[in-house]
Image (tube, rainbow, N blue to C red):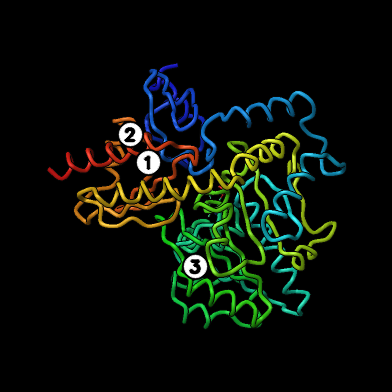
Amino acid sequence: MKLEELQALEQRYLMQTYRRAPVEFVRGEGALLWDSEGREYLDFLAGLSVCSVGHCHPAVVEAVREQAGRLMHVSNLFFTEPMVRLAERLSESSLGGRVFLCNSGAEANECAIKLARKQAYRRGVEEPEIVSLEGGFHGRTYGALSATPRLAENEALGPMLPGFRSVPLNDVGALRDVVYEKTAAVIVEPIQGESGVYPASEELLLAARQACDEVGALLVFDEIQTGMGRTGSLWAYEQTPVRPDLLTSAKALGGGLPIGACLAAPQPGEALEPGDHGSTFAGGAVTSAAALAVLDLIDDPALLRQVRELGAVLREGLLAIDGVEEVRGRGLMLGVGLGEDVDAAAIGVDLLRHGLIVNVPEPGTLRLLPPLTVDSAQIERAVGLIAESLLTYLR
Ligand SMILES: *Cc1c(COP(=O)(O)O)cnc(C)c1O
């Protein structure tokens, strides 16, 4: 089918919730993608940080193939081994408590919100409040959406859930002011992804930890984007001075298949009981098998060291480019701040035309999220392409 035909059918039959770039991809391997005309692309977006082990990693493909050929689904009324092993592995690699498996990032946050409300209820709080940060992104379902201030403003989608408040990123005083006895949780991305790669400061994280401890609220880290090795440690919290009570994961967890997880510390992990929560597909055998294969690849000191090292090389290469004003983020999650006179969207389009896939989350920023398995030659190639594009643009 020709691209024009695909575009016409997409317009006719898919709800128009996305603006897609005019490319049809048909194949992927590692950090490379090929379109329907056989053109090769270097993928520095990795399906929005989903394909962190690269496209079609043979170990993940094999795990999926093997499990799909043996048993795909039986429901949560029974036991399956991949689900249990995955929960064990996630818990032991993070907060040490129980895990709720689900199918997406938004769902992982829904679980965190529900769990936090139940904990607050047990403390006698009647109208619990969840505090989030401006610029944060937690997903599109109503709970997650209500915790996403920029999108929750969309009146046409209202009303949002009651009991959500937000404060500016890294405003310690404002955060302290809103956390009180009724606060059920504070939800934070260690590094905000969708808004353009803006890290939460250590002061903010420490203040959030302390404020939550003072009132018995839960500190939730949304690590759906920062987790699974993206910042150079399995979880981003490991490189901060605080430990959350709940951690949500998704995106890279399934290596391309849809899976999410809400990971708890031991005590909050006890809160949800039969009847409180559930999901038909959750903990499915195929997605769990995929996630176990992904964890085998990512929860590896050598790979994580490489993420830190290549991240530093990428950052330095970017900072040396004319037109790059700052580079934010950590590991292989980088936001490239361009000068005010640079139209980042135009740069993004130009890069795509030259075979480099990046993302433009806000007017002045390119976001780079390459597969964690990227090599130094590919990093160099990406830096060269960005330099060339900016040079042409600024000339
Ligand atoms: C992508 C993302 C989500 C939402 O995940 P979905 O799988 O799209 O529901 C939530 N939080 C963060 C930080 C994300 O990056």
Mark number displayed over residue 133: 3
Of circles 3 and 1, the one toward us is 1
- Residue type (three-letter) at the residue carrying disc 3: Leu
Indicate which disc, 3 or 2, sits on the residue closer to the N terminus: 3
The x and y percentages for residue 318 are 30, 48
On the image, numbered disc 1 is attached to which residue? 358
Instruction: Determine whether 162 is above or below 139 in the image.
Output: below
The x and y percentages for residue 370 are 44, 41
- Residue type (three-letter) at the residue carrying disc 1: Val
Where, quadrant-wise, is the C terminus in this rendering? top left
Residue found 62% across the figure and 73% down from its top: 129
Please state which of residues 158 and 172 is positioned toward the viewer in this rendering.
172
Please state which of residues 190 and 296 is positioned toward the viewer in this rendering.
296
Residue located farthest toward the right when viewing the structure as drawn: 78
Instruction: Determine whether 340 is above or below 376 in the image.
Output: below
Q: Residues within 10 Å of mark 1 (few under 14, many from 20)?
A: many
